[in-house]
Image (spheres, grey):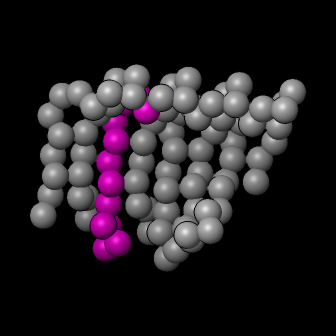
Amino acid sequence: VGSLEDGKKEGPFELYPRTGGVRKGSYLNGELHGLWEYFYETGQLQSKEFYSKGEQDGPHEMFAGNGQSQMKGTFSMGVECGVWMVYG
């Protein structure tokens, strides 16, 4: 669910993949941009990630189905950087 401008995705979007769950975020000139959140079918947050010009750029965090953090790290224009924490 979202809109197109000149044939490109633009603005807020909600995507409903066949595998279930929901993906919410925005596009700018047809590329992923800003905060994207992914949710399990239960509605529980699965991950948060940031994009700039279609590349992951900024904090990234994944969560287990019970809401506990599983992994945290940072991307810089699509490349993992800095310290990444993985929780058991």
- Residue 43 in view, yes or no: no
Tell me: residue 2, above or below residue 9: below
Q: Position of residue 1 (x, y in %)?
A: 76, 54
Queried whether the magenta region covers residue 64, the answer comes back as: yes
Quadrant of the image for the C terminus? bottom left
Q: Position of residue 19 (x, y in %)?
A: 55, 69
Q: Position of residue 74 (x, y in %)?
A: 29, 33
User: In the picture provided, is 47 more to the left or to the right than 20?
Assistant: left
Residue at position x 63%, y 39% from top?
Answer: 26
Residue at position x 56%, y 23% from top?
Answer: 53
User: In the picture provided, is 37 more to the left or to the right than 75?
Assistant: right
Residue at position x 59%, y 44% from top?
Answer: 25
- Residue 52 in view, yes or no: yes
Queried whether the magenta region covers residue 59, the answer comes back as: yes
User: In the picture provided, is 3 more to the left or to the right than 49?
Assistant: right
Q: Position of residue 54 (x, y in %)?
A: 55, 29
Tell me: residue 80, above or below residue 61: above
Give the quarter of the image for residue 47: bottom left
Give the quarter of the image for residue 72: top left
- Specify start and end residues of the magenta stretch as a single range: 56-67
In front of the other: 86 or 69: 86
